[in-house]
Image: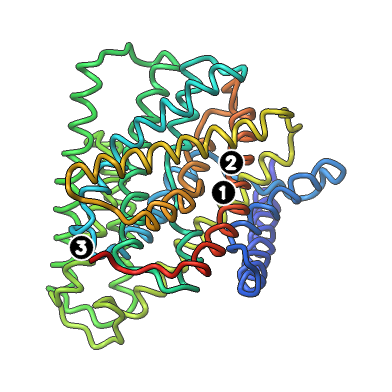
Amino acid sequence: MVDTHANLAQTLGGLALLLLMLAALKVFARRSRLPAESWILIAGLLYGLALRPFPALPILEISPDLVILLLLPALIFASARELSPRHLKAEAAPILLFSTVGVLCTLVLIGLPLYGVTVLPLGDALLFAAAVAATDPSAVSAIFQRFRVPHRLAALIEGESLFNDGTAILVFFTVASVVTGMNMFSLTDTALAFGWMMLGAILLGAALGWCAGRLIRYWAVQNQFPGISITLALVYGGFLLAEHLLHVSGVITVVIAAWVFVFQRRAGTGPSTAPARDGQPEFFVSFWNYVGQLAGGLLFFALGVTVGRHDFPFTWLIPGSIAILVLARVLVIYGGSLVLRLARHALPISWQHVLVLGGLRGAVSIALLLMLPEDYIYREYMLCLALVLCLYTLVVHPLLLQAFLNRKPLTEPD
């Protein structure tokens, strides 16, 4: 008979040590040129390597169900609530272009070369490309806090990432269904399903965000517990309702719900005597900042542990995969910016450089790959390849970005 008490005690002890380590790395990163996410990923890799000679250590990995149901919704809401509707509207054209056409182009620009130079079949290479097409603003946001960055540029990077994530996740599950043979591929059916998943998610998210905001106003919430409880119910209830009942995008639902909910708070639709930051109660901002950083930290650490426990199967593919990723990002940003210029929505060239360097791969890509079944033949291969790309973008790009921002201060376009 399994001693559940002992297992629970071991789990809680491991969690306590993990939280202490994450806190220490966050403090250490204040004096480092690298963001905390970089050090967390490296720490996870080292811990995974330590598990080889010391198998008695707790195996601090995260199950796919825990990733998709617990961490991903919280991470998406924590990021989406910081978006400014005014700046999003101003940068709607590039956000829409990079988060739709840009994702599909990235899928081809990464998937086809990987198919040619790796053991991955075409469908599996496209599946991996869909996962790493998602960019992550969390690490680059930490860098932006050290410099004066135009609000519109920050909104462009964060907006592209969030809507890019939604598109990449939809494409990922579509390709996964084809690769695993769960559904027969039909272009018409896929387009209709894609349209419903997007439109249904937007409508559902708007309705839930509005209802949550009105509920807080009706109850005249003045303290922390009811307000936080309502937002937690909004995040997880909305995600489950979208994914399991209406079969629409849970990510897009949470993004729209967060945007509508926070917009109501900024517009003053509800009394509050608590200290506020940009229209949001201070405790609300602090709580979701913590949740977002915790979810991201756990995902980065989990990827490092997962890969560190296993043999690393790559040699010359390490620089090759990095070159493919960088070239794809360069073509998407500079090519997309040329299209925007022709449409009379030009982006400053300095902004384009920041967009290239700010296309970090992070928590959402990790979450998607960790959701792959453990018996999937290429799961470990893809996780190792993802570690290469995450390490590169989280270690090299922040240094390049800081050097660029130190040399050339950014300004709002005329």
Relative image position of residue 358 (x, y in whole percent) = 46, 53
Q: Quickly name the residue at label 2.
A: 389
Q: Is residue 316 above or below residue 210?
A: above
Image quarter (top left, top right, bottom left or bottom right) of the C terminus: bottom left
Q: Quickly name the residue at label 3.
A: 85
> Would you identify the image quadrant in which residue 223 lies?
bottom left
Query: Of callouts 2 and 3, which one flags the residue occurring earlier in the amino acid sequence?
Result: 3
* Disc 2 element: helix
Relative image position of residue 59 (x, y in whole percent) = 71, 46
Q: Amino acid at mark 1?
A: Thr
* CA neighbours of label 1 inside 10 A, class few (<14), some (14 to 19), many (20+): many
Q: Is residue 289 above or below residue 98?
A: below
In this view, the residue in front, 286 or 394, is: 394
* Disc 1 element: helix
Q: Pointers 1 and 2 in contact (CB under 8 A)?
A: yes
Which residue is found at the position 52% from the left and 62% from the top?
A: 404
In this view, the residue in front, 277 or 33, is: 33
Relative image position of residue 117 (x, y in whole percent) = 60, 19
Q: Amino acid at mark 2?
A: Leu
Query: Of callouts 1 and 3, which one flags the residue occurring earlier in the amino acid sequence?
Result: 3
Q: Which mark is residue 393?
A: 1
Q: Is residue 318 left or right of residue 130?
A: right
Give the CA distance from mark 2 to mark 3.
Answer: 32 Å
Q: Is residue 330 above or below residue 287?
A: above
* Disc 3 element: helix
Query: Mark 1 or mark 3, which is nearer to you?
Result: 1
